[in-house]
Image (cartoon, rainbow, N blue to C red):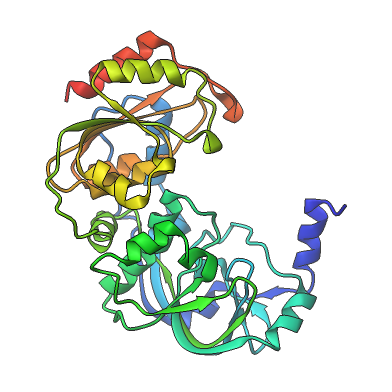
Amino acid sequence: MISPSLKKRIRETGWRHEPFRFLERHIRFMECDYPGRQYPVSPGIEDPVHLAALEAMNGGYDHWRDLGFVAEIRQPCIIEDLHGMLINAENDHVLPNEVLGVHRDVEVALPFKFKYQRKKRTARRVEAGLVLHHHYGVNFTHFYADVLSKLVYFYAKGFPKDIPVIVFRSYYEMPIFQSVIKGPNLRHLKFIIQEDDEYLLAEKLYVVKPLSLRKEGVLGLRDLCDPGNDDRGGDRRIYLMRSGTYDRGLSNRDEVTRIAEGYGFEAVEPSVLDLREQIEIFQQTRYMFAEHGSAEINLFHRKVGTMSTAEFFPKDHIAPIFDVMSMHLGFTHFIFRAEEGEGGGPYQVPPETIHGWFKKLLST
């Protein structure tokens, strides 16, 4: 049995990498949000861990958060089938991580060099396209903020919608992807479907690094993904539960559910609903109380009326994204933190604490 670390070293053997300046020669548009960018902070948030994380985000340059660009790579490139990484077809050098829209320090697994050389010879030729591949796994946050945000940024910079979009077959056929591209703003897109076991050889490619946490990015995402339904808003109260499959260990969820129902909240588990059902729920929600999880990102679908949201975390987990989005949308957002839950282990929240959280949320 080959250990993961040995397998990683074998995969890396024989590869050379292009520097970021390779992309700079192909840039069509580039901008930097730093130092002018400041992420908003919800006035009701008192959690010191969360506030420290936001202060750090606002206090310095970060290559992933602050740099946005569209590059038009005008030379032949291979799109491999492991993560969709781009490889210069002329010298077999791997292009920078930024072509996938991920941080330059993220380790993106590469194909074995000998397999690459074999599959390169049979790569399917395509003329041009916008690469929508992404390194991370599929959840709602990555789907919207890291994948669809590329389309938002690309079209906002004036590029036409008739440029084909390159996407893996497995991604294209996912129900969440199919649901979104049937909406009124995306149904006319053209796609180049890359089979999950084939290489593409493209003569020209567009790659995008979006600025998805900008206010324009959040509002643009809402407009792009508008389902075109009869959105009349509403005043529902929703307790958003995490799926047991992706649980961070809340051990007294049944007790929390009973308390939530006592305050008029419906318990909703997003993983059992299709995307259209989730969108409609968020459009109708006035108050949301949530175990932190990726489905919260659907809050940007609320357009008619305001929303007050609260999310709670285990002790050592930090993720400011939904606070930032809520502020861009003009919503009230609270962060609550349990006193347990180190290292992703099981935790519970005392009933009296839960009651206090609900009362604070409903006071807005």
Task: Describe residue 268's horizontal placement relative to residue 251 as left or right.
Answer: left
Q: Is residue 118 left or right of residue 260?
A: right
**Quarter-wise, where is residue 201 in the image?**
bottom right
Identify the residue at the far right of this view. Answer: 1
Instruction: Identify which residue is drawn at 39% across, 55% down.
Output: 145
Q: Position of residue 133 (x, y in %)?
A: 50, 68
Side of 106 where 210 appears, left or right: left
- For residue 210, say whether it is visible: no
Which residue is located at x 59 percent, y 87 percent?
Answer: 124
Count the labels in the image. 0
For the point 29% across and 72% down, the residue is 187
Image coordinates for residue 320, horizontal then vertical, percent: 39, 40
Between residues 244 and 79, which one lies in front from this camera angle? 244
- Residue 86 or residue 270, whichever sits in front: 270
Vertical comparison of 277 with 51: above or below: below
Q: Relative to 59, is 174 above or below?
A: below
Say whether residue 86 is visible. yes
Horizontal and vertical percent for residue 149? Answer: 36, 62
Residue 229 placement: quadrant: bottom left
Q: Residue 111's x, y, as percent?
A: 71, 70
Q: Outermost residue, top direction?
A: 352
Using the image, determine if residue 101 lies above or below residue 195. above
Residue at 57 percent of width and 23 percent of height: 346
Q: Quadrant of the C terminus?
A: top left
